Image (tube, rainbow, N blue to C red):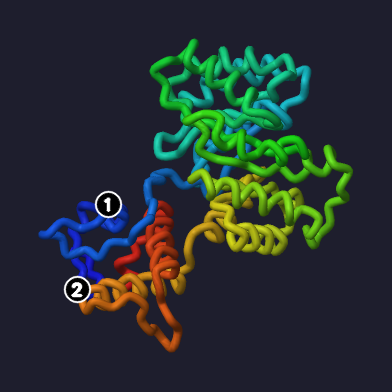
Amino acid sequence: MLRLGTFRVARSTSLLRAIRRQSTTPTRTSSLAPVPGLDLSQTKHRRAVFYVPCSEERKIQKSFHSAADCIMYDLEDGVSLNRKGLARSLVISALGAGPQARELGVRINSIGSGLEKDDLTVILQSARLDVIMIPKVETPGDIHYVSRLVDELAPESSVRIIAGIETARGIVNIRDIAQADKRVDSLLFAAEDYCADTGITRTRGRQELYFARSVVATTAHAYKLQAIDMVTMDFRDMDVLREESREGAEMGFTGKQVIHPAQVDIVQECFAPSRETVAKAWRIVDGYQKHYKLGKGAFDLDGKAIDMPVVKWAYRVLHRAELAGIDGTKIAK
């Protein structure tokens, strides 16, 4: 059994199922305190989205041992123009041999490049394709084009779409992009392309990117999507990687793109709740359950007022911990 003070649920049902119940009004026989407006429907977690150039067999082979939540086989920027055909010939076997426990995706070439239809025609043959990353999305029409081809070529597929926001036009159209199709489940920010498009000079402090990153993260949450942050280009500097990852998590991003295997572990650590945060969330949930039975709304915990927004935050932390494979019961003890 899993215990939160007086709140017990069977471990076999998992923490996710138990806390999802908080968003509904309990029945007469339920002892669970409701949390109105709480949405914990997300069942996938992409902390690290690891790009693997699909023209390099050695890197494809190494990707089979990656711990990244999402392995993204790349047909776009990671592949030179004269090797696009080779990359397509390798991507089907890469998807077929990819680890079963990982989400597998493909980044296609951008809509309008003249390469995207050939990419989609090939990758939609694979039953192991979980997600398509569309780069440089500027209008809902880019999403509609891909979704129509999925309907045509793989009508039974449950493939999802990540929309890459990489230009100023993508930023100003982002709300329509986020709502373009039910297959869209993530918005992704690409800093290098955004800087190239706008003429922004990227600095170590990253202040020039704060607005665009905030727009992407906020819009994603507004439409119940995941938000994936930019690549740390200096892949040898783990201090910068950790700093950027923590900053992204604080801004509301749920994951980050990575381009080197050495980046994966740090990114996945930074985008999972810390032990201290999980322990705090357990105490808040426990306190909420106890005070609800006493007919109290807000309550005091360590000299700080705890009200419904804080309770929702705590449940979301525990949800993220479960998705990240963290056993919160051990931390709670």
How many dots with numbers?
A: 2
Q: Position of residue 329 (x, y in %)?
A: 30, 67
Label 1: element kind: helix
- Residues 309 and 195: in front is 309
Dot 1 alpha-carbon crowd within 10 angstroms: few under 14, some 14 to 19, many 20 or more: some
Residue 323 is left or right of residue 235, and the answer is left
Instruction: Tell me if residue 333 can be seen.
Output: no
**Which picture quadrant has residue 133?**
top right
**Which picture quadrant has residue 267?**
bottom right
Q: Residue at x 38, y 55 (%)?
A: 37
| Farthest residue, direction bottom | 303
Q: Position of residue 290 (x, y in %)?
A: 24, 76
Q: Position of residue 132 (x, y in %)?
A: 55, 28
Residue type beneath disc 2: Thr
- Residues 285 and 81: in front is 285
Q: Is residue 303 above or below residue 22?
A: below
Residue type beneath disc 1: Arg
Mark number displayed over residue 27: none
**Which picture quadrant has residue 84?**
top right
Dot 2 alpha-carbon crowd within 10 angstroms: few under 14, some 14 to 19, many 20 or more: few
Q: Residue at x 36, y 77 (%)?
A: 298
Q: CA distance from mark 1 to mark 2?
A: 18 Å
Q: Quadrant of the C terminus?
A: bottom left
Label 2: element kind: loop
Q: Which residue is mark 2?
A: 6
Does label 1 or label 2 sit earlier along the sequence? Answer: 2
- Residues 59 and 285: in front is 285
Q: Which residue is mark 1?
A: 17
Instruction: Tell me if residue 135 can be seen.
Output: yes
- Residues 185 and 322: in front is 185
Q: Residue at x 45, y 74 (%)?
A: 276
Q: Residue at x 61, y 39 (%)?
A: 175
